[in-house]
Amino acid sequence: MTASFKRKIVRQDLLIGTIITLPSPEVSEILSLSGLDWLFVDLEHSALSVRDAQSILQAAMPKTPCVIRVPSNDEIWIKKCLDIGAAGILVPQIRTSSDAQRAVQLCKYPPKGSRSVGIARAQGYGAKFQDYVASANDEIAVILQIEHMDAVDNIEMICDVSGIDALFVGPYDLSASMGKMGLTTDPEIQKAISHVTQCATQANIPLGIFGISEESVKPYIENGYTLIAVGIDTMLLGEAAAKIIQISDHRQSRRYEEGSY
């Protein structure tokens, strides 16, 4: 397990990653070799299974830590994703302090939480069981997603919950909850995000965010956000292909200008 990853989050090192949605170990391995600091394995908005996620982790880790976003704040999902060896868990749709407390509890072994004890990949299939259970509570990152106006309204109480390693803002779902879907730069959306930023900063909780491009995340990095996800594997692939097509379009344009048609 990548013990240093949580420490990097807590000390607020700038960590740049991208979202993984394709069930391809090769894609994850390639992205890992690119030098990204982390990978965001998305089980909420993709067709990935826990088995797919394990294959992704096996391809990317230990070189590149993988955080798994579970589909919901659910005991079975969280323990399965932890048992395959995730470096961190990202829990979506946190709206209240009770939601936050539940997520933290499910991510930690007793006495700090209620995570059940299994023997799987994370525990070295039994060979590293004692070492893993002794260190997991301190080394696994618990990241909670703030992506609804209810969470913004309750952010002070959420920040008071012990055991949160980072808050990860979801600007797209937040905009939808405010009736402005996709308008992430709208002043009201930005005001809500600023409120989250202020409260988390006061509580010394690291902040993360997703952006569709490098340009979209730069203002947040300048404002102290350190756990950054840029783009999605499918979009990165599509954008690379589109650039190739532009070469063809340019050649056709030149032929037209030269009277080849």
Image (cartoon, rainbow, N blue to C red):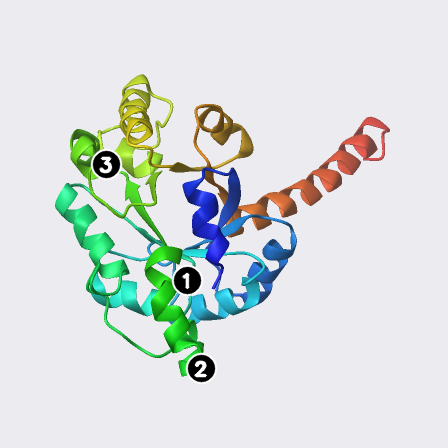
Q: Where is residue 24 shown, x and y percent of the image?
A: 53, 65
| Side of 32 where 159 appears, left or right | left
- Label 3 sits on residue: 159
In the picture, measured across the screen, residue 123 lies left or right of residue 218, that is: left
Circle number at residue 86: 1
Amino acid at dot 1: Ala
Mark 1 crowdedness (10 Å alpha carbons): few <14, some 14-19, many ≥20: many
In the image, residue 30 above or below residue 215: below
Q: Quadrant of residue 225?
A: top left
Question: Residue drawn 36% across and 28% down?
Answer: 184
Q: Residues within 10 Å of mark 2 (few under 14, many from 20)?
A: few
Query: Does residue 243 sit above or below 58 in this rendering?
Result: above
Which residue is pictured at 33% across the width and 36% down the height?
205
Q: Is residue 261 visible?
A: yes
Mark 3: secondary structure: helix
Reading the image, the residue beneath label 2 is: 127
For marks 2 and 3, the one nearer the N-term is 2
Q: Earlier in the sequence, mark 2 or mark 1?
A: 1
Q: Residue at x 33, y 21 (%)?
A: 186
